[in-house]
Image (cartoon, helix red, strand yellow):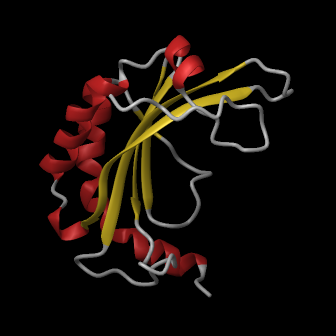
Amino acid sequence: MMTEQDFEDLAVHLHALEPAFESFCSKYGFMRVWGALGRYPRIRIERETDITVWFDLWMSLTPDGEKYARFFDSIPYDLSGGANVMVESSNPYGRMCHVAFSIWDRKPFSEITLASLFDAMAHFLPQLETWDVERLRSHGHDPHPYSSGTGISPPAD
């Protein structure tokens, strides 16, 4: 079983990508999300307006669905982007209307550069910005099966 120190050691290489996230956040008004992300290597940024637009970079799982225990240069990473909003519903906590899109799937860490990360998010941001509260309400889905989501998959844009 991995210890807290093992997880911290596993994520050290992500410091090399922080300048891309810092530049992107500064240019486009995003903020880094700290805490409540779990211990597995991950960086998430969000921009909150009437909806939340986000990008998430995290270490992929092994082909068997397990967590990697040590870093290697070609360890795979996933990058996704999405948007969500909480709306009133019969559920006392509200209902989340959510869309998420895969940008990179299992990209080797050694192929991720500061420029490629920044450019991938900047290229995908206009698509995320087409989502608003009404579009999320009508075409988003609720990622929590215990709540009263629409069950509608987002359209391919």
Residue 116, x across and y down, in percent? 15, 49
Asked which quadrant contains residue 25, the reply is: top left
Left or right side of 48 for 72: left
**What residue appears at the point 72 percent right and 28 percent down from the top-left corner?**
95
Give how far across and how far down residue 61 sits, in percent. 45, 72
Viewer-side residue, 149 vs 42: 149
- Image: 88 above or below 12: above
Q: Is residue 142 above or below residue 114?
A: above
Considering every residue shown, the one lying at the far top of the view is: 134
Q: Is residue 88 above or below residue 79?
A: above
The total of numbered circles placed on residues is: 0
Report which quarter residue 110 is drawn in: bottom left
Quarter of the image holding residue 53?
top left
**Residue 101 horizontal side relative to residue 152, left or right:** left
User: At 38% across and 30% down in the image, what residue appears?
Assistant: 30
Split into 4 quadrants, where in the image is the N terminus? bottom right
Query: In the depicted view, which residue is nearer to us: 148 or 94?
Result: 148
Residue 126 place in picture, x, y as percent = 27, 23
Rendered residue at 43%/19% (across/down): 131
Residue situated in front as seen by the camera: 56 or 82: 82
Q: Quadrant of the C terminus?
A: top left
Horizontal side of 72 relative to 11 (left or right) equals left
What residue is drawn where x is 52% and y is 79%? Answer: 66
